Image (tube, helix red, strand yellow):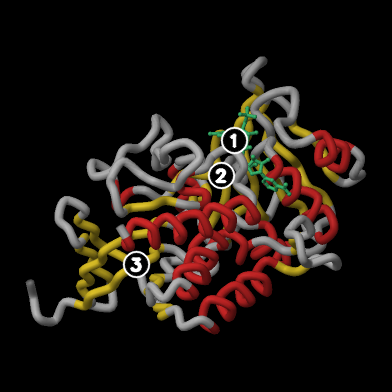
Amino acid sequence: MNENMEKVRCLIIGSGPAGYTAAIYAARADLKPVIYQGMQPGGQLTITTEVDNFPGYPKGITGPEMMEEFKQQAERFGTDIRFGVVTEVDLSKRPFLVKADDGKTISAETVIIATGASAKWLGMESERKFMGMGVSGCATCDGFFYRGQEVAIVGGGDTAAEEATYLAKLCKKVYMIHRRGELRASKAMQHKVLNTANIEMVWDSAPEEVLGDESGLTGVRVRNVKTGELRDLRVMGFFVAIGHKPNTELFGGQLELDEMSYIKTKPGTTQTSLEGVFACGDVQDHHYRQAVTAAGSGCMAAIEAERYLSN
Ligand code: NDP
């Protein structure tokens, strides 16, 4: 084994509620966990505003503040928190081999995967072209730039509904483009969207092209999927809120994934198809996807890692 290789008992990849909770439990169990925060320290909650459904915060808390508190709690028990991205994982050897972009190579006895999920894009060339110049994947991050203007959002789930109502507070008008005639969002969110005066639903429609020039985005062309009719919406901002994909690129071919590329875990546990490798949070859950369920599964992963190490 390479002398420069760092030995770690419990390596945690990802720093959302699942990763930090795993770190809190692993640190308290004296596993001296090391956590790589990943590309988006704090995870998806850092791009949300108010979190009103996490128990223990009766007045609500913002996502970024909550994740800072999770981080501080993990640090309090001695977690080694690193700002960096894991670039390579070799789960064929034991201990497992992990490389990170800080140049470190780690030999890990257990690995807890908490890499979460990322926003999906429509995949149009014009969407890519105007990314950051009018196209955004996060209304709560970028909505501010479009105060008093007209914007469009695509998607019909809870995220799109939440972001549309958020944008409606800032913007003059919000077009909500959905490919069907009924929203997927929860009834409460549907009610909110459909009763917000400055949200106009663009039903049965799909974005065809993002329109713009050197100054940035000028509109979105949508096609009615039933009639084929085209309509140009004159907007300055275009928000994409069509769901997420799990961050499992590092593990393909090494761990069993399901048909949507989420990591498969044994029911009722965080155990993956490889002993000593555990998965928690959104990377293995496309059903609940809540901060509190992610945190719960992070706790399970750390307890299971501890038991695995003591056997
Ligand atoms: P969802 O997968 O629930 O919804 C995605 C939406 O985007 C659907 O309406 C879907 O259409 C549409 N869509 C998907 N792909 C395309 C495409 N290529 N072109 C056009 N439209 C497309 O994702 P969300 O991110 O909204 O929610 C994920 C999970 O998180 C859900 O379980 C949700 O309930 C939960 N959540 C909960 C919140 C809360 O409780 N406060 C807040 C936000 C999310 P279609 O309906 O036709 O499939």
- Nearest-to-viewer mark from 3 and 1: 3
Mark 1 highlights which residue? 207
Q: How many marks?
A: 3
Q: Is residue 185 left or right of residue 12?
A: right
Which amino acid type corresponds to the residue marked 3 in the rendered image?
Answer: Leu
Q: Which residue is mark 3?
A: 11
**Quadrant of res 62:** bottom right
Element at label 1: strand
Q: Is residue 309 left or right of residue 128?
A: left
Q: Residue furthest top?
A: 227
Q: Residue at x 77, y 36 (%)?
A: 186
Vertical order, 181 against 138 (above or below): above
Q: Nearer the viewer, mark 2 or mark 1?
A: 1
Q: Mark 2 — residue?
A: 210
The amino acid type, in three-letter code, at marker 2 is: Val
In the rendered view, tell whether residue 288 sits above or below residue 75: above
Query: In the image, residue 147 lies at what x, y percent?
Result: 78, 64
Specify whether residue 135 is in view.
Answer: no
* Rendered position, 226 above or below 8: above
**Residue 56 x/y as whole percent:** 77, 65
Using the numbered discs, state the Cα–Cα distance from disc 2 to disc 1 in whole angstroms.
8 Å
297 left or right of 237 in image = left
Q: Disc 1 residue type?
A: Pro
Mark 1 is surrounded, within 10 Å at the Cα level, by few (under 14), some (14 to 19) or many (20 or more) other residues, namely many
Q: Could you tell me how far apart the alpha carbons at marks 3 and 1 are, in whole angstroms?
A: 42 Å
Residue at left offset 66%, top offset 22%: 229
SS type, badge 2: strand
